[in-house]
Image (cartoon, coloured by chain):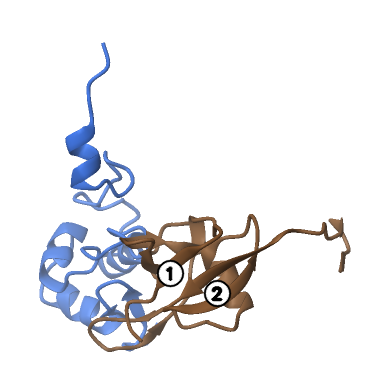
Chain colours: A blue, B brown
């Protein structure tokens, strides 16, 4: 992957930017997310998270899934405030 | 039209929708994204930072590259939304 390759499509973060973050000592997805915004865009890491984890594992020469990896959690899809406001708990 | 595995394509009803006010035709049951591509529209929006063109990327409702305003609702994923008669679709950048 060259430096121009886009890793996070939503925030347009390139492999070069991720590499610089790794070289600066940031080695968990959460740290890189806060530093570069990779994974903070409209798809919330659905596209870039695996690539980001792969880059971290290559850099740290580790087979482990790094802690701090973004995990899917509720709400699983986009929910509007209107939908939440109309929501009623069923007995 | 004949597909080697699926056989003959079924006759489908043609419906009408608009894209940025322009009237277009679509087959009933297909997605908004499929209808736009069939009408030659491949650039759905431009990215906010580098203003690069974006179109259908994942086509399964994950990547949000195909989002548009559909019938007044912003950020609708057009790849997983069926096109309907009279639907008004607006691209974010035009």
How far is mark 1 from mark 2, CA to CA? 10 Å
- Identify the residue at horizontal 24%, vertical 81% (top origin): B48
Q: Residue at x 30, y 58 (%)?
A: A62
Q: Is residue A6 above or below residue A57?
A: below
Looking at the rendered structure, the secondary structure element under dot 1 is strand
- The residue where tag 1 is placed is B89
Please say if the residues under marks 1 and 2 sit with CB atoms less than 8 Å apart.
yes
Residue A47 visible from this viewpoint: no
Please tell me how crowded label 1 is: few (under 14), some (14-19), or many (20+) other residues with Cα within 10 Å: many
- Which of label 1 and label 2 is nearer to you? 1
**Label 2 residue SS:** helix
Q: Nearer the viewer, residue B22 or B52?
A: B22
Q: Chain of mark 1?
A: B
Labels 1 and 2 share a subunit: yes
- For this orientation, the residue located farthest to the top is A91
Task: Pinpoint residue A87: horizontal percent, then vertical percent.
Answer: 23, 30
Q: In this image, B33 relative to B89: left or right?
A: right
């Amino acid at each position: 992957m060259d430096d121009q390759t886009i890793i996070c499509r939503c925030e347009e973060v390139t492999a070069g930017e991720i590499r610089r973050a790794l070289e600066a000592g940031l080695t968990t997805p959460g740290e890189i997310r806060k530093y570069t915004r990779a994974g903070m865009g409209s798809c919330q890491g659905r596209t870039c998270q695996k690539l980001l984890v792969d880059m971290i594992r290559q850099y740290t020469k580790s087979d482990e899934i790094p802690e701090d990896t973004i995990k899917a959690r509720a709400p699983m899809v986009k929910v509007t405030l209107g939908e939440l406001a109309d929501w009623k708990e069923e007995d | 039209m004949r597909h080697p595995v699926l056989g003959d394509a079924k006759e489908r009803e043609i419906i009408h929708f608009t894209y940025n006010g322009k009237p277009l035709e679509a087959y009933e049951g297909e997605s908004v994204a499929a209808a736009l591509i069939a009408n030659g529209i491949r650039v759905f929006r431009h990215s906010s930072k580098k203003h690069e063109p974006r179109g259908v990327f994942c086509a399964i409702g994950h990547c949000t590259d195909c989002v548009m305003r559909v019938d007044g609702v912003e950020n609708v994923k057009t790849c997983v939304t069926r096109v309907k008669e009279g639907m008004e679709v607006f691209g974010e950048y035009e």
